[in-house]
Image (spheres, rainbow, N blue to C red):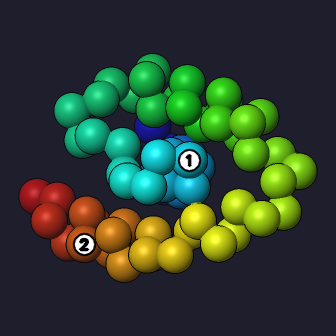
Amino acid sequence: MDERIRKEANRYYWIVKGKLIDESWSDSQVEHIYNSYFTRIWGNHENVVHEEGFEEAWRERIRSMP
């Protein structure tokens, strides 16, 4: 899976759920989140307030990967 898609799916999930996608989820599950959550947050200009902390969490996830 393209890492840009994986990161963006995690960003969408963070906006909606407040956490990153579980690392055990398959590529197809992550892609489903990417597609469905994009539709869910499209046009919601207030969603940026829910992004707070995402970049730090994502950097930590990347650092912990083997």
Is 6 placed above or below 27 here?
below
Rendered residue at 66%/30% (across/down) = 35
* Image quadrant where residue 55 sits: bottom left
Task: Tell me if residue 26 can be seen.
Answer: yes
Tally of marks: 2
Task: Tell me if residue 4 can be seen.
Answer: no
Q: Mark 1 sits on what residue?
A: 16
Is 54 placed above or below 27 here?
below
Residue 10: x percent and y percent? 47, 50
Residue 65: x percent and y percent? 17, 59
Quadrant (top left/top right/bottom left/bottom right) for the N terminus: top left
Quadrant (top left/top right/bottom left/bottom right) for the C terminus: bottom left
Please say if the residues under marks 1 and 2 sit with CB atoms less than 8 Å apart.
no
* Image quadrant where residue 25 sits: top left
Count neighbours of disc 2 (C-alpha within 10 A) and say few if under 14, some if 14 to 19, many if 20 or more: few
| Secondary-structure class at tag 2 | helix
In the figure, is residue 63 to the left or right of 7? left
Is 19 placed above or below 54 here?
above
Disc on res. 60: 2
Seen from the viewer's position, the closer of residues 22 and 31 is 22
| Secondary-structure class at tag 1 | helix
Count neighbours of disc 1 (C-alpha within 10 A) and say few if under 14, some if 14 to 19, many if 20 or more: some
Looking at the rendered structure, the kind of residue marked 1 is: Val
Rendered residue at 57%/68% (across/down) = 51
Rendered residue at 40%/28% (across/down) = 27
Is 26 placed above or below 38 here?
above
Rendered residue at 56%/47% (across/down) = 16
